[in-house]
Image (spheres, grey):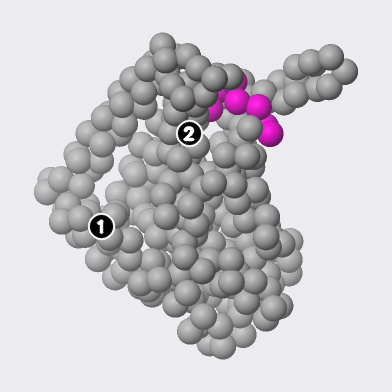
């Protein structure tokens, strides 16, 4: 019997990475907004994203190259986590100087998977607890999924400082962050934590993700489901997806709503 489902967020519940979306929104306002118009600052943000994006892609090309095809899947997962967590804070700095309310407004625009609202509400109607375990930032997850009660949220957080404008205090991002979720091991540990605090056996928990980061969490859950994301799957990394399927215990699904088939297992 399934009593809880823990979801990854980015590209599992959304159609694109939430942080990329928010940073692009931040850059866009520097070029289009009367209030925040500052093309010089926007250009610097673009250069930063381009620079770190290129370095990240270079590391991934090396990681998924033929010389690593014989390496064990846990080696790939560990390396992958190190590369992601290395560059992630630099990307988050692209949100510097945003207020908490501005981030909440832009988070409402993060594109979600089709029919996601109906799907999550259906789970709630079946008395299933819903958790989120993601490298995204908490405010993005909570705001974009505000239509449903989340029973557990394990995400990263931005650091804010308070600025007083008259008698009103405003929370503004410093550009720094607190990374609670860095890699696949953190996600696995969050599944174990969820099981403990809600007193639900692991065999009654489903974990749903779409990436190497999700393999360990899917494996430790009673049932792990990995969505085959065409955008992330290519001829270089497919070798390691196949190794993951052979080494860890999870099933492949095509769409988020395919989860419904497993509710009575």
Q: Is residue 250 above or below residue 9?
A: below
Quarter the N terminus occupies: bottom right
Of helix, strand and loop, which one carries label 1?
loop
Q: Magenta segment, which residues?
A: 94-101
- Is residue 207 visible in the rendered image? The answer is no
Q: Is residue 97 above or below residue 60?
A: above
Q: Report, in whole angstroms, how far the alpha carbon at label 1 lies from the one at label 2.
A: 26 Å
The image shows residue 213 at horizontal and vertical percentages of 42, 52
Of helix, strand and loop, which one carries label 2?
helix
Q: Is residue 28 above or below residue 162?
A: below
Mark closer to the chain start, 1 or 2: 2
| Residue 256 - label | none
Residue beneath disc 2: 25
Residue beneath disc 1: 233
- Identified at 62% across, 56% down, the residue is 145
As rendered, which of 248 and 123 lies closer to the eye? 123
Number of the front mark, 1 or 2: 2
The image shows residue 225 at horizontal and vertical percentages of 44, 70
Can you tell which quarter of the image residue 172 is in? top right
The image shows residue 180 at horizontal and vertical percentages of 58, 41
- Identified at 67% across, 60% down, the residue is 147
Residue situated furthest right in the rendering: 167
- Is residue 259 visible in the rendered image? The answer is yes
231 sits left or right of 6 in the view: left
54 sits left or right of 117 in the view: left
- Identified at 52% across, 24% down, the residue is 33
- Identified at 36% across, 27% down, the residue is 49
Residue situated furthest front in the rendering: 34
């Amino acid at each position: 019997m399934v009593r809880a489902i823990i979801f990854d967020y980015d590209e599992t519940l959304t159609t694109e990475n939430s942080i990329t979306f928010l940073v692009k929104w931040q850059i866009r306002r520097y070029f289009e907004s009367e209030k925040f118009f500052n093309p010089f600052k926007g250009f610097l943000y673009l250069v930063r994203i381009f620079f770190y994006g290129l370095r990240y892609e270079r590391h991934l090309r090396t990681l998924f190259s033929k010389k690593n095809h014989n390496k064990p899947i846990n080696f790939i997962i560990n390396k992958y986590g190190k590369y992601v967590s290395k560059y992630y804070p630099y990307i988050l700095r692209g949100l510097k100087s945003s207020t908490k309310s501005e981030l909440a407004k832009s988070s409402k625009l993060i594109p979600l998977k089709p029919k996601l609202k109906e799907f999550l509400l259906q789970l709630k109607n079946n008395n299933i607890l819903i958790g989120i375990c993601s490298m995204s930032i908490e405010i993005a997850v909570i705001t974009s999924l505000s239509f449903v009660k989340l029973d557990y949220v394990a995400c990263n957080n931005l650091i804010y400082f308070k600025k007083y404008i008259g008698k009103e205090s405003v929370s503004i991002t410093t550009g720094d962050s607190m990374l609670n979720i860095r890699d696949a091991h953190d996600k696995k540990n969050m599944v174990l934590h969820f099981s403990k605090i809600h007193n639900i056996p692991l065999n009654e928990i489903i974990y749903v993700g779409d990436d190497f980061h999700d393999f360990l969490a899917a494996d430790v859950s009673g049932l792990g489901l990995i969505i085959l994301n065409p955008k992330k799957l290519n001829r270089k990394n497919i070798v390691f997806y196949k190794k993951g399927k052979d080494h860890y215990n999870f099933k492949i699904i095509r769409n988020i709503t395919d989860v419904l088939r497993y509710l009575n297992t």
